[in-house]
Amino acid sequence: MEYLKSQQLSSNVDLGEVQPADLSSLKGVDDVLRSLEANLIIPLEHDELVATLDLKPKRGVLLAGPPGTGKTTIGRALAHRLKSKFFLIDGTFISGTGDFYQKIHYVFEAAKQNAPAIVFIDDTDVIFEEGGETGLYRYLLTLLDGLESETAGQVCVMMTAMDISSLPPALVRSGRIELWLEMRLPDEEARAAILNTRLKQLPLALSDVDLPQLVGATEGFTGAGLKRLIEEGKTLYAYDLVQEQALKSATEYFLAAVEIVVANKQRYAEAEATARQEVSVHRGHHTPSSVLLERLYSSMQ
């Protein structure tokens, strides 16, 4: 952050700390990926087209969807692809200290200095949940409206949210959000593609799976849940192998893994219900409870 204050020319994201991701790894959201390519990536990467056609990235983008559907993956992929043109604001900014707004201000200033650029605000609904950050959304509105100027018109603000109803109406009114994108649960075809891609990377003993049966058993799973399923299946197989137990079929291991993931989701739902009752305890100097829950959910899937 100190470097940003003095230079205001570089991303505030250390790519070495960001897990590599590629937009092509997301299945079943082709419409979202096309919109990202057309409305964000092309205006940010193709200087000649920008000059010829006066292209500008959308000023405000809202990426909504349940936990585990790929919102953060999109953020990681954009960070690696856009590099110095990518700036991040997330729950770690909410420290309860007096320099909170200053940090946000410097990120926006750095993005404007490096335009065309994108400011990616993760878990926006959590930041604004029930007014937890008094005055923050008004400050953000001021910054968003300031991007209407010619010099800042090539900065895109992209926000992710699990629950749009938690966002202040003034933030999502027409004009401030120009592009609405929805991350959905993968359908049958998308689940088959995700599972098939991951199963191909496994040894033969685990890749010979009744794919239609497994796809049918995973209705309602997110992409993150399917990834967790594969990890759990590998763990079950490795345990039996090391313990010299009679080995089951790959399909049996992964169907057992389905039960584990479903049980974890149930525990998450119970934890969420408890946390909602104590949400006020987690405000102020603490990370908002729903941020903690989403991280818990992602790790459990």
Image: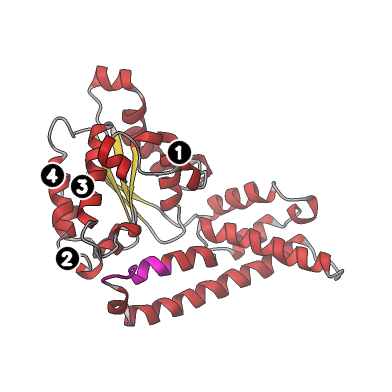
Q: Secondary structure at mark 2?
A: loop
Q: CA distance from mark 3 to mark 2?
A: 16 Å
Q: Residue at x 45, y 38 (%)?
A: 80
Identify whether 175 is placed above or below 219.
Answer: above
Marked residue nearer the N-terminal end (1 or 3): 1
Quarter of the image where the C terminus is located? bottom right
Q: Is residue 175 visible?
A: no
Q: Secondary structure at mark 4?
A: helix
Is 154 one of the magenta-colored residues? no
Q: Is residue 141 visible?
A: yes
- For disc 2, the marked residue is 134
- For disc 1, the marked residue is 80
The image shows residue 275 at horizontal and vertical percentages of 37, 78
- For disc 4, the marked residue is 145
The residue segment tinted magenta is 284-293
Marked residue nearer the N-terminal end (2 or 4): 2
The image shows residue 243 at horizontal and vertical percentages of 84, 70
Mark 2 is surrounded, within 10 Å at the Cα level, by few (under 14), some (14 to 19) or many (20 or more) other residues, namely: few
Marked residue nearer the N-terminal end (4 or 3): 3
Q: CA distance from mark 2 to mark 1?
A: 33 Å
Marked residue nearer the N-terminal end (3 or 2): 3
Query: Taking 160 as reference, is 257 left or right?
Result: right
The reply to whether discs 1 and 4 touch (Cβ–Cβ < 8 Å) is: no
Q: Amino acid at mark 1?
A: His
Marked residue nearer the N-terminal end (1 or 4): 1
Q: Amino acid at mark 4?
A: Asp
Q: Residue at x 24, y 50 (%)?
A: 104
Mark 3 is surrounded, within 10 Å at the Cα level, by few (under 14), some (14 to 19) or many (20 or more) other residues, namely: some
The reply to whether discs 2 and 4 touch (Cβ–Cβ < 8 Å) is: no
Q: Amino acid at mark 3?
A: His
- For disc 3, the marked residue is 105
Q: Residue at x 25, y 67 (%)?
A: 129
